[in-house]
């Protein structure tokens, strides 16, 4: 066990510190810096807990978008990342089981003939979403008839819907609820089209590190640590996952 932890520490905390990448576009997980310059939110708290478990320090590497987080891995800029788990991001990067999840849904303009989720993926419909987000990647892979329109930000996607450049806006439900207040009469279609699962990423080359992070998340879920962080930061719309991620035989049950 000591040798395994030594291997994990050497991979995740070279020089005695973890470098944790933060996706600043997800305000539910990252609340920004306080007056002392300390990063606040569920994701920073989780990174600190991982560092404490290894007995090392933690440094934070903030990025404006999830795509920038993934690109930075190739430059060796971080050792763990707090981002959404997605098969399209796998390969050199491995993900822990999820610790929380956020629903993604569709919004349409006032008076839109699109009233059901099943009506979205039809020929001629244009669906806007934040390019490189987990749900944006999902839409690019799964829309069969509608056109996917990638946008540089949440706000750009919303403005394209308001200006009638697109027919549907896809986003995280908490963000859509904010947009409802900004544009009376717009409508969020019933039902999420997917659930975005939040996880901890690291290099797939270190099996010891992957196993350590999976075990850590399993323990944090079982002890209610994630739920406590969500309550502390009032992350409304972020659902903490609880309970073990393993079967009785100790094998992962996959993503919940």
Image (spheres, rainbow, N blue to C red):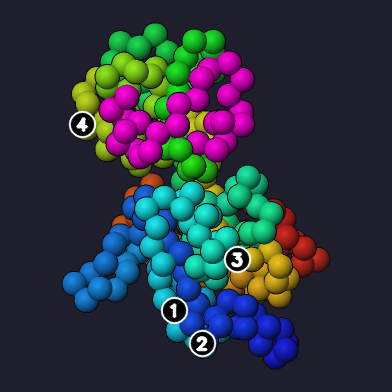
Front residue of this view, candidates 161 and 243: 161
Q: CA distance from mark 2 to mark 1?
A: 9 Å
Report the span colored magenta.
136-160
Q: Image quarter for residue 121?
A: top right
Q: Which part of the image, by quadrant, shows the N terminus?
A: bottom right
**Residue marked by disc 4:** 182
Is label 2 in a helix, a strand or a loop? loop
Asked whether, in this view, residue 32 is left or right of residue 66, the answer is: left
Mark 1 nearby-residue class (10 Å; few <14, some 14–19, many ≥20): some
Mark 4 nearby-residue class (10 Å; few <14, some 14–19, many ≥20): few
Nearest to N terminus: mark 2 or mark 4: 2
Indicate yes or no whether the magenta region holds residue 145.
yes
Q: Position of residue 233 (x, y in %)?
A: 32, 62
Asked whether, in this view, residue 210 is left or right of residue 222, the answer is: right
Nearest to N terminus: mark 2 or mark 3: 2
Q: Image quarter for residue 93?
A: bottom right
Indicate yes or no whether the magenta region holds residue 38.
no
Front residue of this view, candidates 51 and 233: 51
**Residue marked by disc 3:** 202
**Residue marked by disc 1:** 58
């Amino acid at each position: 066990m000591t040798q395994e932890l030594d291997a994990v520490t050497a991979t995740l905390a070279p020089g005695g510190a973890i470098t944790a990448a933060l996706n600043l576009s997800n305000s539910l997980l990252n609340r920004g810096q306080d007056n002392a310059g300390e990063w606040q939110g569920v994701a920073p708290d989780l990174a600190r807990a991982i560092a404490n478990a290894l007995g090392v320090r933690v440094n934070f590497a903030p990025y404006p978008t999830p795509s920038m987080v993934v690109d930075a891995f190739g430059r060796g800029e971080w050792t763990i990342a707090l981002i959404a788990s997605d098969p399209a991001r796998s390969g050199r990067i491995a993900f822990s089981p999820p610790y929380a999840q956020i629903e993604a849904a569709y919004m349409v303009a006032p008076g839109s003939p699109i009233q059901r989720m099943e009506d979205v993926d039809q020929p001629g419909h244009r669906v806007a979403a934040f390019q490189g987000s987990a749900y944006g990647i999902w839409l690019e892979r799964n829309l069969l008839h509608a056109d996917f329109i990638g946008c540089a930000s949440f706000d750009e996607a919303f403005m394209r819907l308001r200006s009638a450049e697109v027919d549907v806006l896809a986003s995280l439900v908490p963000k859509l609820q904010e947009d409802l207040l900004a544009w009376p009469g717009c409508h969020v279609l019933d039902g999420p089209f997917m659930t975005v699962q939040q996880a901890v990423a690291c290099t797939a080359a270190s099996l010891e590190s992957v196993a350590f992070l999976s075990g850590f998340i399993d323990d944090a879920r079982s002890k209610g640590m994630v739920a406590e962080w969500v309550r502390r930061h009032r992350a409304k719309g972020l659902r903490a996952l609880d309970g073990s991620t393993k079967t009785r035989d100790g094998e992962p049950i996959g993503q919940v």
